[in-house]
């Protein structure tokens, strides 16, 4: 554990004023909850939730060679991005393991905006810098320390957006980005999220973050929503089966094992880790990230709890929680390929007792028609 002091986002004082419970997270002091994880979770599913995502990293990659460079550094096909579009992608090591998962947006013909995980900012930056060759015309800028980031998620996020930005402002479509600039600096407005709900995220100069956050919280509350912390962010993403770096994604697991092959463009001429992925695909996957749901009455599963198949311990929980929407325990784990099939009966060992669970299809939560 690092002895370095915890970092604080530009919205730290806002959180204290709202009565947040602050906890360490990825080197930051972040709000885990305000009124409670369950009501904050339900606010997002039914109305709107406002999250501080200022801890996440933002890079700008630009230059004549930016597209080719990013296509070599990341798994998805950057060339498919139109101006103003975004895509989910992964950064791999040579063994095909996941260094980080991220969102990449194309902001101009030769410029790209990357949003990376908070715990990986320094590692991602160093890794990308190491890949630039002397002959490539590629420039990098790290904006992470000078920006605030806010996410608004939920079925009433459009109403919140209009209250703050005005009805004439364009609500960002899914996987899109708008870039604006005024005397206060740039704003990157993105149509993405991590909850399975409609919503938007934006990044802006740190000095402007607190006032915007207060406006968004007030607007969300008018629509029956709430300010939400990391606790509900985790339960929301797990209900959708979205992976968390450090739990469900790791340097010794490939995106093929994680079920993220859709975001790996194997048809590209070359990218870091491609050869290892091709070899693994040919040999067969040793394990797969499977979703499971507890059966009957049981305590919620938590990371690192042992998992048994046929009475034998074969894996451990990667992510697990009690689903507020489903009122049951859910989780994900890397199971041997044969045991990762939907319908497989498994057992989760919790405090010395084993409780039954079943491998199920993702997502756990599906919105009603």
Image (tube, rainbow, N blue to C red):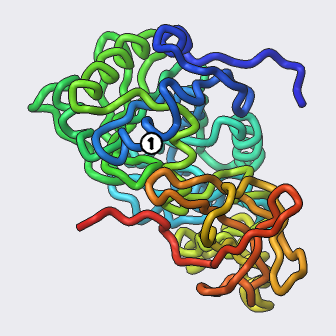
| Quadrant that contains the C terminus | bottom left
Q: Secondary structure at mark 1?
A: helix
Query: In the rendering, at what x and y percent does residue 132 appear?
Result: 70, 47
- Which residue shows up at 83% across the image and 76% down it? 308
Query: In the rendering, at what x and y percent does residue 2 appear?
Result: 88, 26
From this view, report whether residue 136 is shown above or below residue 189.
Answer: below
Q: Quadrant of residue 129?
A: top right
Whether residue 241 appears in this view of the structure is yes
- Which residue shows up at 88% across the image and 60% down it? 352
From this view, report whether residue 256 is shown above or below residue 21.
Answer: below
Residue 138 vs residue 108: left or right?
right
Q: Residue furthest left?
A: 168
Report the residue marked by disc 1.
41
- Which residue shows up at 30% across the image and 45% down it? 46
Residue 152 vs residue 122: left or right?
left
Query: In the rendering, at what x and y percent does residue 249 appear?
Result: 71, 58
Q: Quadrant of residue 12?
A: top right
Residue 5 vs residue 155: left or right?
right
- Which residue shows up at 28% across the image and 19% down it? 218
Q: Nearer the viewer, residue 305 or 230?
A: 305
Residue 236 vs residue 284: left or right?
left
Q: Residues within 10 Å of mark 1 (few under 14, many from 20)?
A: many
Q: Residue furthest front?
A: 297
| Quadrant that contains the N terminus | top right
């Amino acid at each position: 554990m690092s002895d370095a002091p915890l970092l604080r986002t530009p919205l730290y004082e806002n959180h204290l004023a709202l009565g947040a419970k602050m906890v360490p997270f990825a080197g930051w002091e972040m709000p885990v909850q305000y009124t409670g994880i369950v009501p904050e979770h339900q606010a997002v599913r039914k109305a709107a939730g406002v999250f501080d995502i200022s801890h996440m990293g933002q890079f700008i990659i630009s230059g004549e060679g930016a597209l080719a460079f990013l296509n070599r550094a990341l798994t998805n096909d950057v060339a498919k991005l139109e101006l103003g579009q975004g895509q989910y992608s992964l950064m791999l090591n040579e063994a095909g393991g996941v260094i980080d998962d991220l969102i990449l947006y194309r902001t101009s013909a030769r410029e790209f905006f990357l949003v990376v995980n908070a715990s990986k900012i320094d590692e991602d930056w160093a890794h990308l810098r190491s890949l630039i060759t002397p002959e490539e015309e590629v420039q990098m800028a790290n904006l992470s320390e000078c920006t605030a980031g806010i996410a608004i998620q939920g079925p009433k996020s459009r109403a919140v957006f209009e209250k703050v930005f005005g009805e004439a402002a364009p609500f960002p479509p899914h996987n899109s980005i708008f870039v604006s600039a005024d005397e206060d600096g740039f704003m990157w407005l993105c149509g993405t999220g991590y909850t399975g709900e409609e919503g938007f995220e934006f990044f802006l100069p740190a000095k402007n973050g607190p006032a915007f956050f207060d406006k968004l919280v007030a607007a969300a509350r008018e629509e029956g929503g709430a300010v939400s912390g990391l606790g509900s962010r985790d339960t929301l993403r797990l209900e959708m089966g979205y992976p968390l770096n450090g739990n469900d994604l790791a340097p010794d697991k490939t995106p093929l094992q994680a079920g993220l092959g859709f975001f790996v463009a194997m048809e590209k001429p070359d990218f870091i880790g491609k050869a290892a992925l091709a070899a693994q695909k040919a040999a067969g996957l040793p394990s797969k990230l499977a979703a499971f749901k507890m059966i009957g009455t049981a305590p919620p599963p938590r990371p690192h709890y042992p998992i048994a198949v046929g009475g034998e311990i074969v894996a451990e929980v990667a992510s697990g929680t009690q689903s507020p929407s489903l009122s049951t325990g859910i989780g994900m784990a890397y199971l041997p390929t044969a045991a990762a099939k939907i319908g497989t009966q498994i057992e989760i060992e919790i405090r010395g007792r084993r409780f039954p669970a079943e491998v199920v299809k993702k997502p756990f939560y599906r919105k009603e028609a």
